[in-house]
Image (spheres, rainbow, N blue to C red):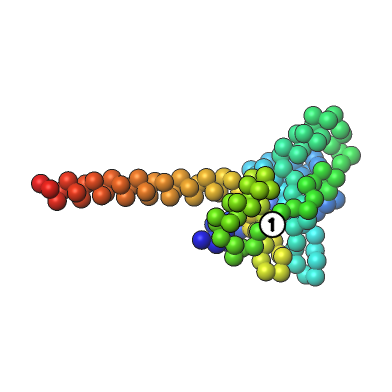
């Protein structure tokens, strides 16, 4: 299954110059744990970094830095790992594991942002699949019992 079919197409984005405080407000308003930092390149919106709620806590709050003095560009994880929307789920999971990330922007063939895939999305999908497997086992038992009566 291509990740483009399961990723969230609603991505909360920010430009590098957005203050950390405004970035945190965006995350709170949209109930997300990350912002994809983007810039315009050739008419496309391209991911250039990512800022997570953990980045805000570790890099700003715990460090005692004035959040008004920083931008999301100052604390973003640069060189963000992305995955193409046509990439398979298994390959993407391995890539996320290798990179040690819980969130990965999804891009089209030209590198433009089209969505985001998160660990939460993957856990939800896995839970649905496990439920379907459990139903299959249950249905098989019922069918076998009915055939033997």
Crowd tier of the residue under label 1, counting other residues whose Cα lies within 10 Å: few below 14, some 14–19, many 20 or above: many
Q: Is residue 111 left or right of residue 134?
A: right
- The answer to whether residue 70 is above or below residue 116 is above
Q: Where residue 53 sits in the image (x, y, percent)?
A: 71, 39
Q: Is residue 103 visible?
A: no
Res 149 seen here:
yes
Front-most of 106 and 35?
106
Q: Locate residue 8: give its quadrant.
A: bottom right
Residue name at image x 72 percent, y 48 percent: 35
Identify the residue shown where x is 89% and y is 39%.
69
Q: Nearer the viewer, residue 82 or 29?
A: 82
Q: Which residue is mark 1?
A: 82
Q: Residue furthest left?
A: 149
Looking at the image, residue 74 lies above or below residue 60? below
Count of numbered tags: 1
Quarter occupied by residue 44: bottom right
């Amino acid at each position: 299954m291509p990740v483009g079919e399961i990723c969230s197409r609603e991505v909360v984005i920010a430009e590098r110059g957005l203050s950390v405080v405004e970035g945190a407000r965006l995350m709170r308003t949209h109930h997300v744990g990350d912002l994809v930092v983007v810039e315009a390149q050739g008419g496309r919106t391209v991911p250039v970094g990512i800022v997570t709620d953990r980045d805000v806590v570790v890099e700003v709050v715990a460090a005692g830095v004035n959040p008004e003095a920083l931008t999301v560009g100052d604390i973003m994880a640069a060189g963000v790992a992305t995955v193409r929307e046509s990439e398979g789920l298994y390959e993407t999971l391995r890539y996320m594991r290798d990179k040690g990330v819980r969130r990965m922007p999804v891009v089209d063939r030209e590198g433009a942002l089209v969505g985001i895939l998160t660990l939460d999305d993957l856990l939800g999908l896995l839970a649905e699949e496990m439920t379907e497997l459990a139903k299959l086992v249950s249905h098989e038992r019922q069918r076998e019992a009915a055939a033997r009566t």
